[in-house]
Image: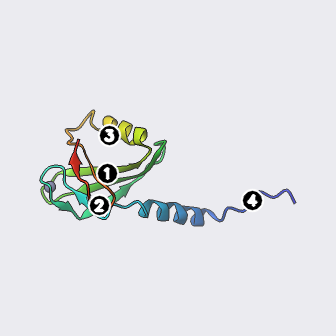
Amino acid sequence: MGQAKNRGTQAERVAQALAKIEAKRPEKLVCNSCGADVTQVNPVSTRGLRGLESIWVGHCDCGHTTFAASGEPQAVEAFFHAISQDTELTLASQAQDGSGYSKA
Ligand SMILES: [Zn+2]
């Protein structure tokens, strides 16, 4: 009857979005400062950030903050470029499982 396709309630859509983000959670994050495993990793909203699927911020025991982002390579690059403007950052890349860590 000309009804819009049912895409679920807003709560369902939010849950789906969260599940999508959680699927991208790094299994571990390596501190860019001391190289230790960062255990406290929290998701950051990517709202308004085109091309980015997820952003993670990890707080290491040494006091250093490490960011991780996934999504389109150009968007990830732009994100790190943007946050490196006003903070001293050491950039590195790694796979989601924490392997292949290398400093940029
Ligand atoms: Zn550290």
Identify residue for label 4.
Answer: 5
Q: Position of residue 23 (x, y in %)?
A: 43, 63
Q: Is residue 76 left or right of residue 16?
A: left
Residue 64 vs 39, above or below: the answer is above
Q: Amino acid at mark 3?
A: Phe
- What kind of residue is marked 2? Val
> How has the structure been colored for display?
rainbow
Q: Which residue is mark 2?
A: 41
Marks 4/2 in contact by CB < 8 Å: the verdict is no
Give the x, y percent position of residue 18: 48, 62
Residue shown at the point (54%, 64%) measured from the top left:
16
Q: Nearer the viewer, mark 4 or mark 1?
A: 1
Q: Separation of disc 1 and disc 2 at Cα?
A: 9 Å
Element class at badge 2: strand
Q: Earlier in the sequence, mark 3 or mark 4?
A: 4
Front-most of residues 56 and 91 = 91
Residue 72 placement (x, y as % from top left): 44, 44
Question: What residue did someone put label 1 on?
Answer: 68
Question: Does 66 sit left or right of 75 as displayed?
Answer: left
In three-dimensional space, the C-alpha distance between marks 3 and 4, rounded to whole angstroms, equals: 38 Å
Inter-mark Cα distance, 1 to 3:
9 Å
The amino acid at mark 4 is: Lys
Cα–Cα span, label 4 and label 1: 35 Å
> Which secondary structure, mark 1?
strand
Query: Which quadrant of the render holds ligand 1?
Result: bottom left
Please, what is the three-letter code of the amino acid marked with disc 1?
Ala
Q: Is there a contact, CB below 8 Å, between mark 4 and mark 1?
A: no
The residue wearing badge 3 is 80
Q: Could you say which quadrant of the image residue 88 lies in?
A: top left
Q: Quadrant of residue 80?
A: top left
